[in-house]
Amino acid sequence: MAEEAELAADQHVRYIVTVEKKKDSFESLVMEHIRLNGAYWGLTTLDLLHKLHAVEAAEVVDWIMSCYHPESGGFGGNVGHDPHVLYTLSAVQVLCLFDRLDVLDVEKVADYVAGLQNEDGSFSGDIWGEVDTRFSYIALCTLSLLHRLHKIDVQKAVDFVVSCKNLDGGFGAMPGGESHAGQIFCCVGALAITGSLHHIDRDRLGWWLCERQCKDGGLNGRPEKLADVCYSWWVLSSLIMIDRVHWIDKKNLTKFILNCQDKENGGISDRPDNAVDIYHTYFGVAGLSLMEYPGVKPMDPAYALPLDVVNRIFLRK
C-alpha cells in the first residue's frame, strides 16, 4: 500500500466520460432504470473536479428533458420510464449544474412534487404511495432549489421528519424505523433546508454518527456493518450540518477513500480492491470535498451540489 495515496482525478474524469458512452456494458445495463441518478452522480463528480466541460451541455440537457413527463410534471429514471421524485430531484440538480433551470416548466414540476405530500406531512415517492423520509428530503430539496417551498405545508413536513427521530438521536425511514446514516442525512438535510435544526439533539446524534468510523478509517451506515465509501458523504454531511464534523478522524477517512480508487482505469469502489462504479466514485469524491481535499470544489452538505452552484441559485439578484 502506498505511503500517501493521492486522488487520481484525471483517471476518474476519463472513467466517468467513458462509462457514459458504453451503453452495452454491465454497469450501464444494471443502471438503466436509474440512469438519471447516474447522470447526477457522474456530472456532479466532474464539476467537483473542475471538468464539467468534458461533456456537451446541450446534449445532456436534451437527454434530461427526454425523461420528462409533461402531463404530470415529473421525471422518470430513463426515457419512457415512470415519473418519481427520486429522478425529478436528480433532473433538477443536473439542470442546476448547467445553470439551465430555464428549460423547466417550474410551476408544473413544483406542483408534481407538492401533490405527493400526504395529510400527515410525509411524502410519497410517486402515485403508488410508498412513504419514506428520503422522499421528504427529496421534495423539500427540489422545491427549495426551484424557490417553491410555499406550495407545501412546510410545518407538517417538518413535524413528520421529527416524528421519525429515535432515542439514539438518529432517524429512520418512518416513525419507529431503525436509525441509518442514509436516512439521517435525509432528515438532517430536510431540517437544514427548512431552518429546523433546533429539533436535533446535536451531541447525541453527533456521537452516533462519529461511532460509524471503523478501524480501517472508513464509515459504516449502522452498527456492526463494514465501512463503505458512500457513507463518507451521508455521515460527514450530517456532521457538518450539526457542527460535529471535528469528531471524525479525517486523515484516516481520507486514506480509506483514496485506497478504494482504481488508479489506472479510474473510479472508486465501496471498499479497497472491489469493482468501481459511478455511485461510489461520486460519494468518494464528495466525501473528499467535505474534508476540503486540495483540487476538489467545496460541496453544500444540505443540497448535495457544489457550493458555487447553490450560491448561484440562492444569491442571484
Image (tube, rainbow, N blue to C red):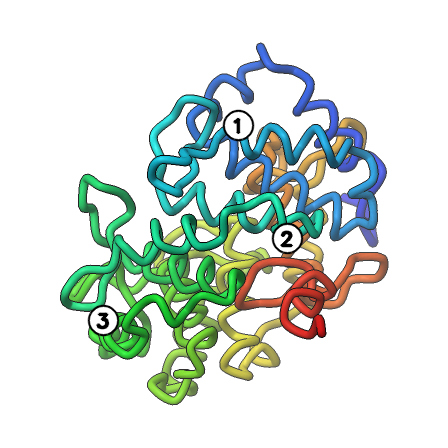
Q: Nearer the viewer, residue 99 or 111?
A: 111
Q: Secondary structure under badge 3?
A: helix
Mark 1 or 3: in front is: 1
Tell me what residue is drawn at x 44 percent, y 41 percent. Answer: 87
Q: Amino acid at mark 2?
A: Cys
Distance (Cα) linking label 1 and label 3: 34 Å
Left/right of residue 202 with respect to residue 286 in the rendered view: left
- Between disc 3 and disc 2, the foreground one is 2
Viewer-closest of 172 and 136? 136
Lower position in the chain sequence, tag 1 or tag 3: 1
Is residue 315 found left or right of 116 in the rendered image? right
Q: Which residue type does callout 1 highlight? A: Ser
Q: Name the quadrant containing residue 287.
A: bottom right
* Residue named by callout 1: 66
Amino acid on which disc 3 is placed: Phe
Residue 315's quadrant in the figure?
bottom right
**Residue 126, position as x, y percentages in the image:** 27, 43
Quadrant position of residue 166: bottom left
Q: Secondary structure at mark 2?
A: helix
Q: Earlier in the sequence, mark 2 or mark 1?
A: 1
Q: Which mark is residue 160?
A: 3
Quarter holding the N terminus is top right
CA separation, marks 3 and 2? 28 Å
How many other residues sit within 10 Å of disc 1, few (<14), some (14-19) or many (≥20)? Answer: some
Is residue 75 depicted above or below 193 in this figure?
above
Give the mark, 3 or 2, whose residue is nearer the N terminus. Answer: 2
- Disc 2 marks which residue? 96
The answer for how far apart the CA atoms under marks 2 and 1 are is 17 Å
